[in-house]
Amino acid sequence: MNPASAVLSALREEVENAARRAGRPVPRLLAVSKTQPAEAVARLADAGQRAFGENYVQEALGKIRALSGRGLEWHLIGHLQSNKAREAAQYFDWVQTVDRPKLVAALAAHRPPELTALN
């Protein structure tokens, strides 16, 4: 087992146990991959992690492109500037931090037609 697999497995077990003790459903893990190189994200993806969070559109784009075709889910978790809405709508599966109506309209306008809904 590679180190990323061991860490991910231990973390998942700890989260699952805590959820059971609290009588709650097991939450999905969102690995925050900001500042990490694509190779580190790939190792965690190879270990089974599917969802990754990024704070900056520009930093994420290289990783998203490098790791395309792996079935990964990308979340924008940082502040979104209006001038980055087009790229966010095209490349991210989820935008978690929409703080003004103008961004909703920009994201909707730039969402590719083959992606049926803006998450």
Image (tube, helix red, strand yellow):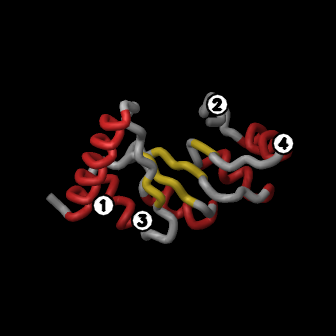
Q: Position of residue 114 (x, y in %)?
A: 61, 32
Mark 3 and mark 1: Cα distance apart in space: 9 Å
Q: Decide which of tag 3 and tag 1 comes sooner along the chain.
A: 3
Kind of residue sitting beneath label 2: Ala
* Camera-nearest label, 4 or 1: 4
Q: Residues within 10 Å of mark 2 (few under 14, many from 20)?
A: few
Query: Under tag 4, what secondary structure?
Result: helix
Q: Decide which of tag 4 and tag 1 comes sooner along the chain.
A: 1
Q: Decide which of tag 4 and tag 2 comes sooner along the chain.
A: 4
Kind of residue sitting beneath label 1: Arg
Query: Under tag 1, what secondary structure?
Result: helix
Query: Which residue shows up at 31% across the image and 37% down it?
Result: 21
Q: Which residue is mark 3?
A: 38
Q: Position of residue 2 (x, y in %)?
A: 18, 62
Q: Which residue is mark 1?
A: 43
In the rendered view, does 115 fall on the left or right side of 21? Answer: right
Q: Circles 2 and 3: CB distance less than 8 Å?
A: no
Give the answer, above or below, for where 12 lies relative to 112: below
**The one of 23 and 69 positioned closer to us in this rendering:** 23
Q: Which mark is residue 78?
A: none
In the rendered view, does 80 fall on the left or right side of 25? Answer: right
Query: Which residue shows up at 46% across the image and 62% down it?
Result: 33
Mark 1 and mark 2: Cα distance apart in space: 29 Å
Kind of residue sitting beneath label 3: Ala
Q: Which residue is mark 4?
A: 101
Q: Which residue is mark 2?
A: 117
In the rendered view, does 73 fall on the left or right side of 83? Answer: left
Q: Position of residue 112 (x, y in %)?
A: 66, 38
